[in-house]
């Protein structure tokens, strides 16, 4: 390098030498550290403005040729320190300098300022002294809000301990040096416990047999500096500084590399090397023609250049050509393009900085400032971690944490972009909304962790179907949506069909085989709307209609759907009013013993007479009551009214009440039943609840416990619609039912379909084997009646026996039937 400098000096003569010296002066004045060079007699050879600022001495008190000892004597007058402070420090400095090795001192001023003084010997004799102001502490040990930014900005690891050697504060560099996980250290933990944990993890010091004794040596009332070798071979230098009102501050530096290369490195251009080669940033300076004046090692490392590539006078564009040739920059960019971009943005437009993304993924922030005498000084900082953190934050803000799909926010942005293209007349766009058909049951039965895994697996399957131009997002819960650029509705329907097929095979989650499916609603822009709100509303309406038609289905929006939804909303409002307006009444349909023809019970049926629309069928309003939660108070009203009316019947006749699965989620349901029985005087043995397979599918232990509680009161339990579910038989093992009702679909086909007749006989035989009564419902012909009798069913119900009757009519019917002895 010296030869290169000499050659450059010959080339550029006095003018360039003057420029180089001017650069030295500028670089020295802009340093964040204080710098002072002294000769072998401790006389000041060179110093910068920052040195005088840090130690608090006016520039007039320090000058070339001044004795460093005289300068330190001025501390007492300026700093108002004890009179012996500078003398003690001067004695320590001269003693350490005689050893001829680098050393560091910490000096306190104002009783609150801690300054680090670093002494390094020069090759020709003398010393380079740099100083840093480490921290400022208030009377109360310093507020954390003030200290934290200071220690985080330090290049060394910093720790602050209280008087009991417990951790009070530390910076990220300290954790990095020792490889500590952030979860290991907490404020208030003792240093000894953390040190012992680190030893177990392999970070212990070689030949360390007495860690407690070593800590006692470190934490004294005087400054201590030591070096320790870790088991991984690294050497850490630790400097312990006692604090005035108790506690300690420790500095930690990994000096392994520095020690390894210390003797191999030579000062280049003496003062320039001392300033530049210790910078964490890359630095280079150019004249007004953008030709290189000086460069530091960090810049060369960043761009994989050598000193031979960066001789003084080398044009900046040539440096860029070298780095491009070595594959440093991203593919496809030329040196000329980079140079033009550099000049336009940093020099002409005076942008504060530009970012260069390198081929190895690193990101460099480039900043250039003009020099007073002409030319430019540039710094190059590796900001990869900061850049990646910002990128990660931006991604998190727009993606779902569970599935890594776009979230509602990003979906809205993509929707706006897609609708903008539609508005330009370039294309149509389909919006598809869908959710899982039974996700709530999965969460309730298997737990939310399993539900989360189900969502992840569904996202994985559907992502494989969705095209690269589509936007597939999770909006929340089990709600998903897709923006699909399309040519027509048929294309969107094909995609919907593919999504349904992707869910055809069961999911295997944590050993559970889960059968899930999705229903999809589709809206097309601009046909169904030109705004995001319009399209989402239409897609939601289509989704609602698809779910009404059954599982694993899809529907394209039809304007008629809007009218139907409006009518449903009106019905929902009227339903809320109906209970208080006394618009409901009860009917009862008898059940007879097929052997004796005697009436043995009656099933209560809810009826609604609307003041304007007249009679409304249960199939129209029961589902709305369940969705809105109104089924709970409505079910309680039915139970209380039916028990009061059944109390008037003969004691041999029982009352059958249908229960919704939602009623079992009411933890107070058993108390409601007890209250209804007590208020009416009806015996518990005369009450029977009919439940469907959907209730037991919730697989909730609390539901089985509630059924056993009801059974313990003497109430009978019947399974309704037996044979229609895929696991009906398994439920007979979970709970001992008193009665099973054969679904009316088997009875209706029994006189025409031999297979249905076989199923009826099989269920009846099963009931006999398990000592469970069997009821055939939906008997409408004499042939059906004879068939269920021959099959062995114990009870029957249907229009042939009796249609549903009002409360007054059922009472008269029971009386007549008891006198006649047969059903009419």
Image: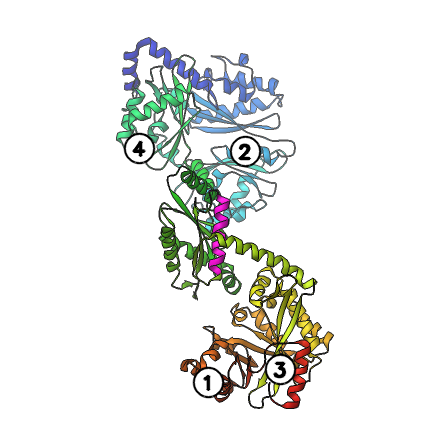
Front position in the image: 676 or 207: 676
Q: Earlier in the sequence, mark 1 or mark 4?
A: 4
Label number found at residue 601:
3
Q: Secondary structure at mark 3?
A: strand
**Mark 2 falls on what kind of element?**
helix
Disc number at residue 255? none
Q: Is residue 531 magenta?
A: yes
- The residue under label 4 is 328
Real-space Cα separation, disc 2 to disc 1, in angstroms: 83 Å
Q: Are marks 2 and 4 in contact (CB under 8 Å)?
A: no
Depth check: 465 or 321 in front?
465
Along the polypeptide, which appears first: circle 1 or circle 3?
A: 3
Q: Mark 1 to mark 3: distance in Å? A: 23 Å
Q: Is residue 410 above or below residue 61?
A: below
Q: Residue beneath label 2, please? A: 149
Q: Is label 2 in contact with label 1 (beta carbons under 8 Å)?
A: no
Residue 761 image label: 1
Callouts 1 and 4 close, C-beta under 8 Å: no
Cα separation, mark 1 vs mark 4, equals 82 Å
Residue 154 visible in the displayed image: yes
The CA distance from mark 3 to mark 4 is 88 Å
Question: Where does the magenta region start and end?
Answer: 530-547
Tag 3 near tag 4, CB within 8 Å: no
Instruction: Verify CB contact (< 8 Å) between mark 3 and mark 2.
Output: no
Disc 2 crowd rating (10 Å Cα; few below 14, some 14-19, many 20+) is: few
| Percent x, y of residue 521 | 45, 54
Q: Earlier in the sequence, mark 2 or mark 1?
A: 2
Q: Quadrant of residue 344?
A: top left
Image quarter hosting the C terminus: bottom right
Mark earlier in primary sequence (2, 4): 2
């Amino acid at each position: 390098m010296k030869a290169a400098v000499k050659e450059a000096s010959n080339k550029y003569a006095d003018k360039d030498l003057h420029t180089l010296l001017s650069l030295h002066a500028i670089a020295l004045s802009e340093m964040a550290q204080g710098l002072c060079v002294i000769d072998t007699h401790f006389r000041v050879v060179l110093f910068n403005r920052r040195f005088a600022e840090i130690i608090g001495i006016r520039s007039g008190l320090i000058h070339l040729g001044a004795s460093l000892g005289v300068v330190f004597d001025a501390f007492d007058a300026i700093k108002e320190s004890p009179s012996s402070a500078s003398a003690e420090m001067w004695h320590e400095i001269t003693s350490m300098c005689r050893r001829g090795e680098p050393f560091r001192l910490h000096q306190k001023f104002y009783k609150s300022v801690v300054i680090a003084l670093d002494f390094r010997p020069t090759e020709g004799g003398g010393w380079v002294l740099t100083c840093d102001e480490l921290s400022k502490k208030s009377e109360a040990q310093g507020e954390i809000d003030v200290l934290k930014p200071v220690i985080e900005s330090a290049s060394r690891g910093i720790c602050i301990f209280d008087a009991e050697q417990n951790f009070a504060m530390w910076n990220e560099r300290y954790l990095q040096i020792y490889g500590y996980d952030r979860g290991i250290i907490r404020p208030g933990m003792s240093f000894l416990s953390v040190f012992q944990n680190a030893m177990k993890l392999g970070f212990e010091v070689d030949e360390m047999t007495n860690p407690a004794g070593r800590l006692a040596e470190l934490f004294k009332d005087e400054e201590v500096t030591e070096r320790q070798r870790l088991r991984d071979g690294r050497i850490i230098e630790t400097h312990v500084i006692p604090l005035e009102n108790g506690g300690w501050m420790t500095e930690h530096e990994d000096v392994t590399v520095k020690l390894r290369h210390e003797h191999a490195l030579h000062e280049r251009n003496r003062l320039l090397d001392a300033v530049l080669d210790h910078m964490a940033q890359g630095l280079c300076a150019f004249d007004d023609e953008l030709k290189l004046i000086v460069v530091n090692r960090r810049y060369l490392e960043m761009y994989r250049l050598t000193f031979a590539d960066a001789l003084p006078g080398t044009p900046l564009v040539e440096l860029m050509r070298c780095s491009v040739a070595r594959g440093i920059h991203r593919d496809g960019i030329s040196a000329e393009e980079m140079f033009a971009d550099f000049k336009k943005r940093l020099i002409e437009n005076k942008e504060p900085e530009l970012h260069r993304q390198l081929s190895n993924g690193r990101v460099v922030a480039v900043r250039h400032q003009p020099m007073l005498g002409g030319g430019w000084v540039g710094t190059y900082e590796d900001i990869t971690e900061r850049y990646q953190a910002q990128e990660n934050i931006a991604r998190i803000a727009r993606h779902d944490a569970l599935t890594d799909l776009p979230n509602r926010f990003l979906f809205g942005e993509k929707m706006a972009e897609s609708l903008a293209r539609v508005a330009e007349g370039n294309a149509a766009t389909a919006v598809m909304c869908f959710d899982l058909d039974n996700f709530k049951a999965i969460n309730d039965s298997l737990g939310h962790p399993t539900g989360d895994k189900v969502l992840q697996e569904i996202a994985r399957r559907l992502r494989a179907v969705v095209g690269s131009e589509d936007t597939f997002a999770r909006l929340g819960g089990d709600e998903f949506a897709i923006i699909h650029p399309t040519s027509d509705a048929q294309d969107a329907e094909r995609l919907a069909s593919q999504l349904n097929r992707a869910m055809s095979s069961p999911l295997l989650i944590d050993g559970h085989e889960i059968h899930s499916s999705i229903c999809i609603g589709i809206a097309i822009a601009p046909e169904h709307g030109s705004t995001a709100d319009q399209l989402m509303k239409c897609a939601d309406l289509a989704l609602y209609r698809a779910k009404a038609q059954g599982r694993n289905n899809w529907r394209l929006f039809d304007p008629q759907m809007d009218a139907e939804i409006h009518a449903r909303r009106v019905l929902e409002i009227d339903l809320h009013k109906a209970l208080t307006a006394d618009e409901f009444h009860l009917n009862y349909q008898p059940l007879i013993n097929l052997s004796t023809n005697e009436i043995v019970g009656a099933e209560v049926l809810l009826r609604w007479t609307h003041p304007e629309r007249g009679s409304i069928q249960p199939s129209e309003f029961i589902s709305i009551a369940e969705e809105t939660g109104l089924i709970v108070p409505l079910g309680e009203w039915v139970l209380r009214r039916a028990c009061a009316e059944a109390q008037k019947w003969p004691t041999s006749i029982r009352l059958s009440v249908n229960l919704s699965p939602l009623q079992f989620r009411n933890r107070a349901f058993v108390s409601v039943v007890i209250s209804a029985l007590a208020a009416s005087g009806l015996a518990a043995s005369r009450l029977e609840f009919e439940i469907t397979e959907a209730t037991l599918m919730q697989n909730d232990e609390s539901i089985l416990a509630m059924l056993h509680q009801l059974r313990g009161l003497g109430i009978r339990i019947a399974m309704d619609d037996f044979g229609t579910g895929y696991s009906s038989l398994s439920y007979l093992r979970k709970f001992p039912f008193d009665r099973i009702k054969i679904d009316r679909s088997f009875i209706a086909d029994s006189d025409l379909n031999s297979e249905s007749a076989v199923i009826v006989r099989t269920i009846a035989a099963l009931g006999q084997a398990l000592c469970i009564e069997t009821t055939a419902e939906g008997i409408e012909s004499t042939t059906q009646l004879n068939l269920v009798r021959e099959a062995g069913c114990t009870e029957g119900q249907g229009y042939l026996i009796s249609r549903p009757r009002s409360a007054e009519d059922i009472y008269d019917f029971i009386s007549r039937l008891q006198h006649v002895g047969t059903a009419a």
